[in-house]
Image (tube, rainbow, N blue to C red):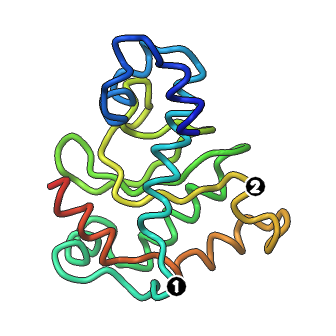
Amino acid sequence: YVTNCNNAIAGTEWDDKPIEVIMANISKLPPAVRNNGGGHFNHALFWSVLSPQGGGEASGALGDDIAKTFGSFSALKDQMSTAGATRFGSGWAWLILDANGKLAVCSTPNQDNPTMDIAEVKGTPILGIDVWEHAYYLRYQNRRPDYLKAIWDVIDWHAVAERYAAAK
């Protein structure tokens, strides 16, 4: 993703811009940047919030905000899992802070994300779950809901809380 994105912006006004700026202006760029830049941004975030020592529940300010917004941690998991399970085709499920600083759940197709100026729901992602088939096929075949149940065991809530604090 990185190489292909860099190749697509080489020699343009975008070649020295951070990926966040590129994503926020994606409507001005060719599809190769949307697909590869989105793939880079999304996977970098995804891998940053996974850990073999993950699982459990969010605590502290993030845990409090989850309870306030969704009613419970379990309700958040249900909403995110539903967002991922019902995403037609490939895409992502997201926990974001919206423009008002409120937590929200959404999903995006393909390699799109909520930071893009074309996103239906815009915001700062603090957790992203990959629902492309390649993310789960070797272990779960076509059973995306089973993958979405298991992914919570490797979510690093400390890393998600750091993203939450930075976005607040």
Q: Quadrant of residue 130?
A: bottom right
Question: What residue is shown with label 1?
Answer: 52
Q: Quadrant of residue 104?
A: bottom left
Residue at x-position 58% and y-position 39%: 1
Which residue is farthest right? 141
Taking the image as shown, residue 133 lies to the left or right of residue 54, namely right
Q: Between residue 70 and residue 29, name the one nearer to us.
A: 29
Q: Is residue 164 above or below residue 123?
A: below
Question: What residue is shown with label 2?
Answer: 133
Residue depth check, mark 1 versus mark 2: number of the one nearer the observer? 1
Residue 5 in the image: x percent, y percent? 53, 29
For the C terminus, the image quarter is bottom left
Q: Is residue 19 above or below residue 126?
A: above
Q: Amino acid at mark 1?
A: Pro
Instruction: Please tell me how crowded label 1 is: few (under 14), some (14-19), or many (20+) other residues with Cα within 10 Å.
Output: few
Instruction: Please tell me how crowded label 2 is: few (under 14), some (14-19), or many (20+) other residues with Cα within 10 Å.
Output: some
Residue at x-position 43% and y-position 55%: 45
Taking the image as shown, residue 157 lies to the left or right of residue 3, namely left
Residue 95 in the image: x percent, y percent? 39, 57
Taking the image as shown, residue 27 lies to the left or right of residue 83, namely left
Q: Earlier in the sequence, mark 1 or mark 2?
A: 1
Number of numbered discs visible in the structure rendering: 2
Q: Between residue 93 and residue 39, name the one nearer to us.
A: 39
Residue at x-position 23% and y-position 72%: 62
Q: Secondary structure at mark 1?
A: loop
Residue at x-position 31% and y-position 80%: 58
Residue 6 in the image: x percent, y percent? 50, 28
Q: Alpha-carbon distance for marks 1 and 2?
A: 21 Å
Taking the image as shown, residue 157 lies to the left or right of residue 38, namely left
Q: Amino acid at mark 2?
A: Glu
Q: Secondary structure at mark 2?
A: helix
